Amino acid sequence: MAFITMQTPRNTKVFVPALTPFHADLSVNKPAFITFCRWLVSQGAGLAVFGTNSEANSLALSEKLELLEALVEAGLPADAMMPGVGLCALPETIALTRRAVELGCAGALTLPPFFFKPATEDGLFAYYAQIIEAIGSDGLKVYLYHIPQFTGVPISCALIERLLKAYPQTVVGVKDSSGDWGNTERMLREFPGFEVFPASEALLEKALPLGAAGCISATANVQPGAIAQALQLWGSAQFEAAQARLKSVRNLFQAHPMIPALKHVVASHFGDSGWRHVRPPFTAADGAWADGLSQQLAQLDFRMGQA
């Protein structure tokens, strides 16, 4: 593997869009959520709670506020948290963002408003500007969330440039979940010093030489320690083998509905079948493929938490 000569990125980090456990009646299982998040942090990961793979847009604002407060009350470090805050209703986004700042969270991962389309650059700029002005705090660090295949609302490089000019101390990064490496590469090259997080650990070997901040990945729910270790190994002879293993695991999960697949494996690891519960429109892992996934992972000698 050819490395691009460049200084190792500083403070690279893996953040996890932590899965949200539910009871059989589909209410949130708060104790299980706290326990799982504590385990993720113990593995060296940060918490991007209320991300896509957290089933965030199936959670009410009140549920998110309660869970975020519960994590901090349970002693989990707020400075390791980057909660997803972007909602269609601007007042709700502001309310959740304000609480995240009050609690001392490291940042706010902010989807664009995703119902009304097409969204103009002026409209999107106004949305983010309203959030920043309403919070009015130096403690607010906004991370943009680019996932156009879900939102239908892309975050362009032109919008990023405009926001950086207006709010250089507040708009500090982006998660690129587009799946388009060309777009990720462009963000990395055009905005040096901007914290760009690819959405897959499989991209680390290409993204780290260009200054990526780490990754925010769905499969960090099941291999957080291995990703954290790979980031530490960057630039060493051991990195290539670590990256290859991360890719092998990621590829197995990508072949199935991601959230049910992740919950199936977490359920097995913790010995708690309740982890398989998902809110509609998702359906629980189907034994027709879930058992096969478990067998394939066993063939890789995969264990959650193994670094």
Image: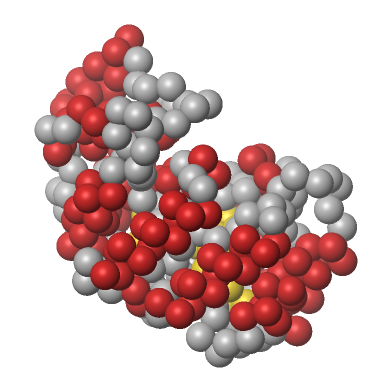
Number of marks present in the image shown: 0
Relative placement, left or right, of 11 versus 5 is left
* 127, above or below 246, in the image: below
Q: Position of residue 13 (x, y in %)?
A: 36, 67
Rendered image coloring scheme: secondary structure
Q: Position of residue 237 (x, y in %)?
A: 24, 62
- Residue 299 seen from this side: yes
Relative placement, left or right, of 233 versus 16 is left
Q: Residue drawn at (54%, 74%), measured in percent from left and top?
A: 98
Relative placement, left or right, of 154 versus 173 is right
- Residue 241 seen from this side: no
Most foreground residue, 126 or 8: 126
Q: Residue drawn at (30%, 28%), measured in percent from left and top?
A: 24
> Would you identify the image quadrant in which residue 208 lies?
bottom left
Most foreground residue, 60 or 253: 60
> Would you identify the image quadrant in which residue 228 lies?
bottom left
Q: Residue drawn at (40%, 80%), measured in percent from left and top?
A: 104
Most foreground residue, 146 or 81: 81
Relative placement, left or right, of 242 versus 149 is left
Q: Position of residue 127 (x, y in %)?
A: 75, 66
Residue projecting furthest to the top: 288
* 46, above or below 303, in the image: below
Q: Position of residue 195 (x, y in %)?
A: 53, 72
Q: Residue drawn at (31%, 63%), measured in percent from left and top?
A: 70
